[in-house]
Amino acid sequence: MTVPANDNPDFFLHEGDHGTFIREEYPEIMPTHIRPLIYLTDAPNKHFDTVLQGRGSWEIGVRDGITNAYRHLRSIVFSRSITESPDPTVEFVATDPVERVRELKREEGMGIWLCGGGKLAAALRPEIDEMIIKLHPVVAAAGIPLFGGDFAPEQYDLADTHVFNSGVMHLTYTKP
């Protein structure tokens, strides 16, 4: 088995009863180029209208020629090294991510989805009101941490669970 470069978690389970749940309940997290293949071309967003990514997560798609994997969402990439977007449908932000997220929260709209990036998650941790963790029965033993920052325990309440026959669990946590 080839060890991934810790930048593309392609070992997650895609087949199984959890896939139907994700496609039906969270169609907006499916990349735009995949949506027609799984009959979601015109599916409305249910939870999120904005996606946030760190540069590393965004570059996973760029390596495959996809400069905006989520054209059906407002796409924002945080990067200190890339300040001008190569795609007019992607906003690049080089300033403080916390301040930008606070601005987004004041706007009308749906939720904000943080799509990958342990460093970005650590920076935005004070603004994370809800975490949806997709737990797969796969042990990688290495990879990108959920929060790539300093050790600082913080309590969240378990708000919802979905356990699937595939062994995948969807766990929703909220700030108390």
Image: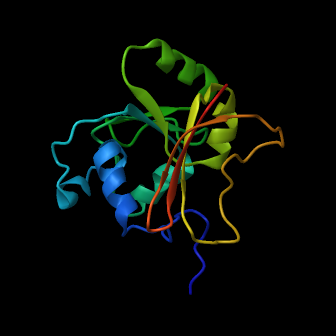
Q: Residue at x 67, y 33 (%)?
A: 125
Q: Is residue 96 visible?
A: no
Pick the residue in front: 116 or 176. 176
Q: Quadrant of the C terminus?
A: top right
Q: Residue at x 17, y 55 (%)?
A: 39
Residue 149: image x %, image y %?
76, 43
Q: Residue furthest bottom?
A: 1
Residue 165: image x %, image y %?
44, 66
Say which quarter of the image contains residue 119.
top right
Q: Is residue 137 visible?
A: yes
Residue 58: image x %, image y %?
47, 50
* 10 w.r.t. 96: above or below: below
Pick the residue in front: 142 or 89. 142
Q: Residue at x 53, y 64 (%)?
A: 9
* 134 w.r.t. 83: above or below: below
Pick the residue in front: 176 or 105. 176
Q: Please state if 21 lies on the left or on the right of 135 as rendered.
A: left
Q: Residue at x 42, y 38 (%)?
A: 85
Q: For the image shown, how many numbered marks are present on the structure?
A: 0
Q: Please state if 111 lies on the left or on the right of 3 as rendered.
A: left
Say which quarter of the image contains residue 128.
top right
